[in-house]
Amino acid sequence: MTEIHDACVASGHSQLLIIRDIPVMLGLHEYFGLAEMSQPALQRVKTAWVNPYPALQPDLEFFCLASNNRGANYRVFSDLWRAEKWLKKRTTTSPSIPSYSFFLSQATA
């Protein structure tokens, strides 16, 4: 996550689209730890998670909720179109923070 954050910062991106093509999830108790670790790594990066596995949607929504409660700006989507639409919504009025999409696709585990 830190590498992803560093790539976003180095390229001037404040938005991130992650296509999570992994058909399994962690245990419920592990979400809190992941939320704690990922939030500082992606601080100030609006992140859309695209999940192609409907059965995992509630788990990913819980992860986003736990992360957002710690200061992240995450949201999970079932399709790319809605994720891109959400990312394009302006979240700041500061002209010093450019807002572009940065795409990352994970290989299937």
Image: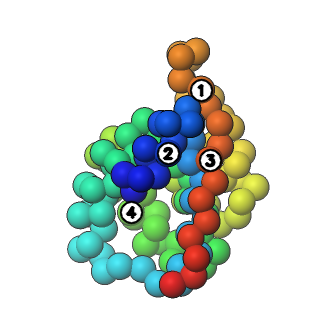
Q: Amino acid at mark 1?
A: Pro
- Whole-percent x, y for residue 80 in the image: 71, 59
- Whole-percent x, y for residue 58 in the image: 47, 71
- Whole-percent x, y for residue 92 in the image: 54, 23
Residue under numbered circle 4: 63
Give residue 98's mark: 1
- Coloring scheme of the render? rainbow
Question: Do the numbered discs 4 and 3 sit on residues whose CB atoms are within 8 Å?
Answer: no
Name the side, left or right, on which 67 lies relative to 55.
left
Disc 1 or disc 2, which is closer to the eye?
A: 2
Give residue 102's mark: 3
Q: Amino acid at mark 2?
A: Ala
Question: Do the numbered discs 2 and 4 sit on residues whose CB atoms are within 8 Å?
Answer: no
Question: Do the numbered discs 3 and 2 sit on residues whose CB atoms are within 8 Å?
Answer: yes
Disc 4 or disc 3, which is closer to the eye?
A: 3
Location of residue 90 (image quadrant): top right
Distance, label 1 to label 2, CA atoms, is 14 Å
Which of marks 4 and 2 precedes in the sequence? 2
Per the image, label 3 sits on a secondary structure element best described as loop
